[in-house]
Image (spheres, rainbow, N blue to C red):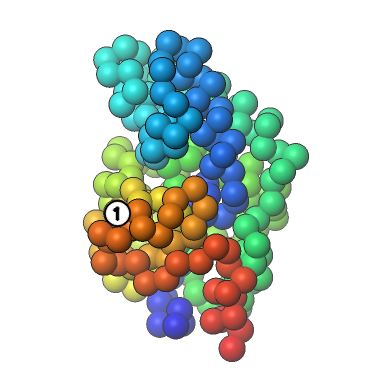
Amino acid sequence: MFRKYKAFVFDLNGTMVNDMPYHIKAWHHQIIQLGGDLTLEQMKHQCYGKNDELLERVFPGKFSLAERIKIGNEKEAVYRIEFKPFLQLIDGLAEFLKLAHQDNIKMAIGSAAIMDNINFVIQNMQIAHYFDAIISANDVEKSKPHPETFLKCASALGIDPAHCLVFEDTPKGVECALNAGMQAVVILGEHEASEFEQYENVIHFVKNYKELATFLSN
């Protein structure tokens, strides 16, 4: 099923580690402190794209770019402290990465996370050696659902976008894959399968990677 693809491109948050509740909580606290009035449910649907873009959506014109970056970095520091005791890969991912690597499938991370957060995961989990390219929020002008993130992953890997399979957990991420001309597997966590009905590029839904590992081990 997956061996026809030449490259796998992974989102990070909610796709490789189940950390979205920690991001949502950290952002919600920050937004309330800044005078916003979003509920936790509303905050969940704002958690996509680069930090400065999120803040501009919630507080249009209120903060300069430098201020938004500073606020975002403060939030990320809180997230890393609160999530570290619970940091682990989503079930089955370690085996899936190992099998894909053995099959010589190129792999990349394409995330709206800052590089500090990506390193926080891949270094603590000791999986950095599996990835041939990493595109973070620091590397793009326009974040998801704009296709720049995933197209840069494909370019860095030297693989045609049509031969890349994306692993994502959010509708905006899947839309990004669609805009990049890539098919996607959805890891269900904070979002339900019904939220992805409009995306024709979704080929599979799973709760974790255990099932996916069997496709590579057979």
Identity of the amino acid at label 1? Glu
Residue 109, image x, y percentages = 48, 55
Q: Which residue is located at x 34 percent, y 30 percent?
A: 53
Q: Is residue 138 visible?
A: no
* Left or right relative to 205: residue 117: right
* Left or right relative to 133: residue 180: left
Q: Which residue is located at x 56 percent, y 28 percent?
A: 26
Residue 103, image x, y percentages = 55, 80
Where is 114 relative to 75, above or below? below
Residue 188, image x, y percentages = 49, 57
* Left or right relative to 101: residue 133: left
* Left or right relative to 12: residue 43: left
Residue on which the image places disc 1:
175
Q: Is residue 217 visible?
A: yes
Q: Which residue is located at x 50 percent, y 74 percent?
A: 105
**Callout 1: 10 Å neighbours few (<14), some, many (20+)?**
many
Which quadrant: the C terminus? bottom right
Where is 3 relative to 55, above or below? below
Quarter of the figure with residue 129:
bottom right
Quarter of the figure with residue 44:
top left
Q: Which residue is located at x 41 percent, y 23 percent?
A: 38
Residue 7, image x, y percentages = 43, 70
Where is 35 relative to 29, above or below? above
